[in-house]
Image (cartoon, rainbow, N blue to C red):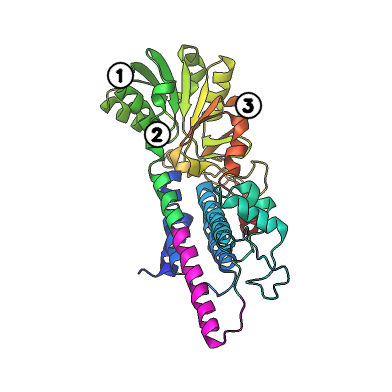
């Protein structure tokens, strides 16, 4: 078993040094680190879920602070916290159901009780959740997350005490086992998100269409190639994506996979958009209001698409759905990359000299990595679960996150 603290520290260093690129890879590694962290946690005899939530939240704050602009880290941390809350609720519901609440004693004067009295709200929540999986609504309204599995009370002496201890240990092991299994499913969902999205390509791409894209996105590549495999015949315009020119690599890959591809400059997007039937792009993150954090230049593409009534479609795995809003002060929407991507300092060394004692260089270079595309410019989101309008995203996000866990980012940002 690897040392979990060394594993976490190694991941923290990689996040700080930007050694991991891509939201999918970052999300997958985050989930794997949290899975290892959870597996080595020793839970107390009472309130196991609360202790596990506090432990995961603590390490999650460190991970989020290491690279605030990579929102996939915070998304996965909150997903895992939501998983713990739902597994706790499931175990509590099963325990209450096992007490046979519906089959009460005929003797109303029964003096002994199997456990502490439960409130009507908790009993109602448990009764509902024995018939259906727990939802965010019941999680927030009916049952507080600190509710523990009822313990039996008796006067059986040491044997009863040992039995209670065994039950508590069993409950802790069961909670950890269920959480780890759910995290494994999350990791699998992240790993297969490309395939799930690509399966929908044939529904959206038709014969003789012209598709425009910008940025290097594995999801977009698999989506376009899936349509090609379904015998769809279409052309792709690829904006080169200066200054990193990721469009060149994307165009090369599309050509090798048999797609008709045309490379255009970023400044030619408005000139070429009238010939385009659809814009299909990837995303860095999708905010709760349906806005998109995307590679720089995509806001220009979205404006051009709106001006010419061209559908602007965003492909995004579920791990990219962020429950925060872009106006939240803790959300870091952008980061500046190295000026060397724009200029050769050998040629501009004279301009970079400090002039006349002012303390400022003659030349400044700004190289932002991302754009923000507001929801009114997005026509459709295609996720692992299907196509959704921007106005529906907040409801979709509500299925994956707990409101109590939105404070993780706020604490780490303060």
Q: Secondary structure at mark 2?
A: helix
Q: Position of residue 249 (x, y in %)?
A: 34, 32
**Disc 3: which residue:** 376
- Look at the numbered discs 2 and 1 and tell me whether their residues touch, using CB distance below 8 Å: no
The residues tagged by marks 2 and 1 sit, at their Cα atoms, a distance apart of: 27 Å
At mark 1, the secondary structure is loop
User: Is residue 28 in the magenta section?
Assistant: no
**Residue linked to disc 1:** 231
Asked if residue 151 is positioned above or below residue 248 in the image, the reply reads below
Q: Earlier in the sequence, mark 2 or mark 3?
A: 2
* Image marks 2 and 3: residues in contact by CB distance under 8 Å: no
Mark 2 — residue? 246
What percent of the width, then of the height, locates residue 409?
61, 54
Q: CA distance from mark 3 to mark 1?
A: 33 Å
- Position of residue 180 in the picture relative to residue 293 (left or right): left
For the residue carrying disc 1, how many other residues have a C-alpha within 10 Å: few (<14), some (14-19), or many (20+)? few
Q: Quadrant of the C terminus?
A: bottom right
Q: Which mark is residue 99?
A: none
**Could you tell me which residue is drawn at 67 percent across and 65 percent down?**
106
| 3D distance between C-alphas at marks 2 and 3 | 26 Å
* Bounds of the magenta segment: 153-180
| Disc 3 element | helix
Q: Main secondary structure of the magenta part?
A: helix
Q: Is residue 414 above or below residue 289?
A: below
């Amino acid at each position: 078993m690897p040392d979990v603290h060394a594993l976490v520290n190694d991941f923290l260093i990689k996040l700080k040094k930007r050694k991991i690129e891509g939201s999918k890879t970052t999300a997958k590694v985050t989930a794997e680190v949290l899975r290892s962290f959870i597996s080595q946690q020793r839970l107390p005899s009472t309130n196991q879920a609360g202790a596990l939530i506090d432990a995961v939240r603590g390490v999650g704050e460190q991970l989020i602070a290491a690279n605030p602009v990579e929102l996939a880290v915070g998304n996965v941390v909150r997903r895992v916290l939501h998983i713990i809350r739902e597994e706790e609720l499931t175990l509590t519901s099963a325990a209450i159901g096992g007490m046979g609440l519906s089959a009460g004693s005929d003797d109303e004067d029964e003096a002994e009780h199997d456990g502490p009295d439960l409130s009507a709200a908790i009993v109602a929540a448990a009764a509902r959740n024995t018939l259906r999986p727990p939802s965010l609504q019941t999680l927030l309204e009916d049952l507080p997350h600190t509710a523990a599995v009822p313990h039996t009370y008796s006067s059986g002496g040491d044997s009863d005490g040992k039995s209670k201890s065994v039950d508590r240990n069993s409950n802790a092991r069961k909670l950890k086992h269920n959480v780890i299994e759910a995290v494994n499913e999350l990791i699998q969902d992240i790993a297969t998100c490309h395939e799930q999205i690509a399966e929908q390509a044939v529904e959206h791409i038709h014969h003789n269409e012209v598709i425009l894209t910008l940025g290097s996105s594995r999801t977009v590549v698999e989506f376009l190639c899936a349509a090609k495999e379904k015998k769809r015949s279409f052309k792709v315009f690829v904006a080169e994506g200066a200054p990193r020119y990721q469009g060149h690599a994307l165009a090369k890959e599309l050509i090798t996979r048999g797609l008709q591809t045309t490379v255009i400059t970023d400044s030619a997007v408005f000139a070429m958009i009238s010939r385009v039937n659809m814009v299909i792009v990837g995303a860095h993150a999708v905010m709760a209001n349906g806005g998109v954090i995307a590679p720089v230049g995509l806001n220009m593409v979205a404006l051009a698409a709106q001006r010419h009534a061209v559908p602007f479609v965003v492909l995004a795995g579920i791990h990219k759905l962020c429950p925060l809003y872009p106006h939240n002060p803790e959300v870091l929407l952008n980061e500046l990359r190295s000026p060397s991507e724009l200029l050769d300092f050998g040629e501009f060394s004279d301009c970079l000299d400090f002039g006349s004692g002012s303390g400022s260089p003659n030349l400044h270079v700004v190289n932002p990595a991302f754009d923000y595309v507001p929801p009114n410019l997005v026509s459709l989101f295609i996720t692992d679960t299907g196509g959704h309008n921007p106005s529906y995203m907040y409801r979709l996000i509500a299925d994956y996150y707990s409101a109590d866990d939105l404070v993780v980012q706020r604490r780490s940002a303060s």
